[in-house]
Amino acid sequence: MREFFMHSYSLIASAKINLYLEIIRARPDGYHDLVMVLQSIDLADQIDLHSRSDDSICLHCNHPEVPQDHNNLAYKAAALMAAKFPDAFAKYGGVDITIHKRIPVGAGLAGGSTNAAAVLIGLDLMWNLKLSDKQLQYLGSLLGSDVPFCIVGGTMLATGRGEYLTPLPVLDSFYVVLGKYRSLSVSTAWAYQTFRHLYFGSHVSDSLTIENLRQPVCSADMVSAINHQNQQQIGQLIYNDLERVVLPEYRKVQRLKEEFQRLGCPAMMSGSGPTVFALTNSQAKAQQVLESVKTAIADPDLELWVSRFTPSSIRVASFHK
Ligand code: ATP
């Protein structure tokens, strides 16, 4: 009979924003080769893990749009750990996963990915596996492109699908104002497929489109600005290719970006959106920008947050062994 280990872990799982997202090419496997600069922020979910006396995985979440079954990325992370480490799963038993959602869903902030990363890290600790970051990132890559970043977090250059990661110097002096319309969410798959169709489709032969696509390519400048901690240049170089397909479709998101810019802040959509972020260098300025945008747009559907850059993604808040 199994010995019952009553373990519990509470983890804080941070969201991310994309300071830079450039789509280099469409790959035959349906994915895209990207160059991204990813940044963890302190807007975070809380993930509680409790061991169970049976061998089931159960998931609860307080957000109505988040699946509570095997479709949840956090559930998939636990199922993957159980499949990869059957001896540990047999020894320690199943797990109750409770997600306290604070990161908006379908927002381009990697909410699902960071929850999955927290479960991989939490079960590694609970099951005493002592996996390295590299091993955890490999497991994360089987779940989704942003999960490997979420294992470590901070400020990273990501290439390939997002799984090849190079740490960059920590940027910790930025504050960020986030804006998202509660009723809007963008499917990441839709955004990439639309981009692929418009810019990499077999019908694209005209030189204007190809020239248009070549224009940005300033990831090296962004990396250099980060290496030199040059805040002004970082603000000038933020970039996201997916804005080209999302902003024309969602005019409210375009308007929100323009409002941040009108207030003098560098602003950009994160990932596949529709969250827009604006950079500031103090909390007071960020709060002031938030209040100004709230007044200027005056739409109860618009949610705004002040957050700040953070040097890691997942941290253990408490545990009981
Ligand atoms: P990314 O920036 O990685 O593309 P996102 O922030 O745009 O992700 P998520 O919040 O991760 O999007 O949610 C995308 C979809 O994934 C949601 O519509 C939801 O149904 C599903 N999902 C599965 N697991 C989770 C989870 N743990 N948290 C949030 N959404 C989840």
Image: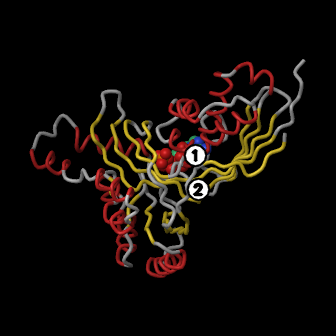
Residue found at x 34% / y 51% = 242
Q: Secondary structure at mark 2?
A: loop
> Looking at mark 2, is its residue's CB closer than 8 Å to ligand 1?
yes
Label 2 crowd (10 A; few <14 / some 14-19 / many >=20): many
- 84 up-or-down from 33: above or below: above
Mark 1 and mark 2 lie on one chain; the one further toward the N terminus is 2
Quadrant of residue 160 in the image? top left
Position in image of residue 103 (x %, y %): 58, 56
- 6 up-or-down from 225: above or below: above
Q: Which residue is mark 1?
A: 114
Assign the C terminus to one quadrant of the image. top right
In the foreground, 190 or 101: 101
- 98 up-or-down from 177: above or below: above
| Three-letter amino acid code of the residue under disc 1 | Thr
Residue found at x 55% / y 68% = 305
Q: Which mark is residue 103?
A: 2
In the foreground, 319 or 230: 230
Assign the N terminus to one quadrant of the image. top right
Quadrant of residue 193 in the image? top left
| Three-letter amino acid code of the residue under disc 2 | Ile
Residue found at x 55% / y 69% = 306
| Pointer 1 with pointer 2, Cβ within 8 A | yes
Farthest residue to the front: give it: 228
Whether residue 290 sits left or right of residue 233 in the image: it is right
Quadrant of residue 85 in the image? top right
Farthest residue to the left: give it: 207
Label 1 crowd (10 A; few <14 / some 14-19 / many >=20): many
